[in-house]
Image: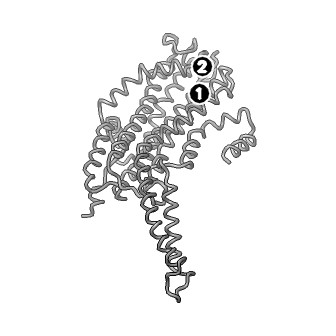
Amino acid sequence: MNKTLEDKPDFSLVLGGPLFQLFRRAHLVGDGLELARRRVAVIALLAWLPLLIFALPGGHALGGGIKIPFLYDIEVHVRFLVALPILIAGELIVHSRIRPAVNRFVERHIIAPEQIPEFHAAIKSAMRVRSSLFVELTLMILVYPLGFWIWSTQIASGVPSWYSMSGGSHLQQLTLAGYWYVFISLPIFQFILLRWYLRFLVWFWFLWRISRLDLRLHATHPDRAAGLGFLSSASYAFAPILFAQGAMLSGLIANRVLYDGHDLISYKMQAAGLVVFFMFFILSPLLVFSPHLSQAKRRGLSDYGELGSRYVEAFDRKWIAGKRSSDEELLGTGDIQSLADLGNSFGVVAETRLVPFGVKDLARLAAATAAPLLPLGLTILSLEELVSRLIKILL
């Protein structure tokens, strides 16, 4: 049997864990993450719809003498009707892009045959953490004290709203909708978000284990990453999570500007910081391969430098010193083409990056994070001005 096919890994960041098994029993997910629309609808409506229902009796859905009625609360709608569905649907994207990327370590012979058992051991270790009952229970326990503290100190508005008549996060002043919001809706969202952070740490841990192996990298690979360029494409799988993070910040800023009288410009550093932080957050696991890339580049420059010296010496002796047959013409000879090919190969080695991603990858992930923030710019700039400034930044 073919060694590559025989040892094809079975890796997934999302197919497993107690919650996944619970969803299977509830017919909200299939073995291959089917039923995504049903899963999104059930979870999003469980978090959002009761808030609307409970806000209606007191008139808090549209008014009721409060500053932030439910239907005008941009942050809560973005959180539960935009970010939460994206976080749920993003599982299918991550599964479909990360699993093939892991397979390529074997398919492209980057992992030496004698280290295949260690490669599979790294996969099993990562899958044990991903499927750990203890880990998911710990996340569930954390979302109440930690999640409530983050919400009450960083997110809750200080004015009377549909969830708190006194403003802020005082439990004794919560409305019926507020109790569902604090003890049901927010924990659902925060658990799913923390679960994504856990999965990302599992991905980081797995790549670190792989970077400890003796990888077969070639500096002449045309991806300019010694054969690891596929990892940057795999990182695009996390773009929906970045978009959801940007959407959450966008909704929060919108509420602060509309209801608390904050200046939109005052949030420019927070917005820029979010983009930079999450770009680093997503791409930082790939930095574990930098020592391998550096070694491959040094080895390639040394090997091709030595080969180039030998070839040029022979070329000069033959064509410059004239030690060739009198009937042999320079133009059209294979020596010229070989010299050009050697130069091209050396150029590829010299351009090998020390990280398996490039500027385009940075730009795409930054765009995914910043895209939800662009509508905020329309509140202070016309569409033409906003587009013009974006073009200036990009060009």
The disc placed on residue 386 is: none
Viewer-proximal residue among 6 and 133? 6
Relative to 385, 113 lies left or right: left
Image location of residue 120, percent across then percent down: 28, 48
Residue 306 in the image: above or below residue 67: below
The disc placed on residue 59 is: 2
Residue 22 in the image: above or below residue 255: below
In the rendered picture of this protein, how many numbered marks are placed on residues?
2
Residue located farthest toward the top when viewing the structure as drawn:
172
User: Looking at the rendering, which quadrant does residue 288 occupy?
Assistant: top left
The residue type indicated by label 2 comes to Gly
Relative to 172, 157 lies left or right: right
User: Looking at the rendering, which quadrant does residue 246 occupy?
Assistant: top right
At numbered mark 1, what does the secondary structure look like: helix, strand or loop?
Answer: helix
Query: Which of the two discs, 1 and 2, sits closer to the camera?
Result: 1
Q: Which residue is mark 1?
A: 252
Image location of residue 82, percent across then percent down: 54, 36
Residue 212 in the image: above or below residue 328: above
Question: Between disc 1 and disc 2, whose residue precedes?
Answer: 2
At numbered mark 2, what does the secondary structure look like: helix, strand or loop?
Answer: loop
Residue found 49% across the figure and 83% down from its top: 324
Viewer-proximal residue among 373 and 203? 203
Viewer-proximal residue among 34 and 374? 374
10 Å neighbourhood of mark 2: few (<14), some, or many (≥20)? some
**Cα–Cα gap, marks 1 and 2:** 23 Å
Image location of residue 340, percent across then percent down: 53, 70
Looking at the rendering, in which quadrant would you find the N terminus?
Answer: bottom left
The residue type indicated by label 1 comes to Leu
Image location of residue 220, percent across then percent down: 45, 60
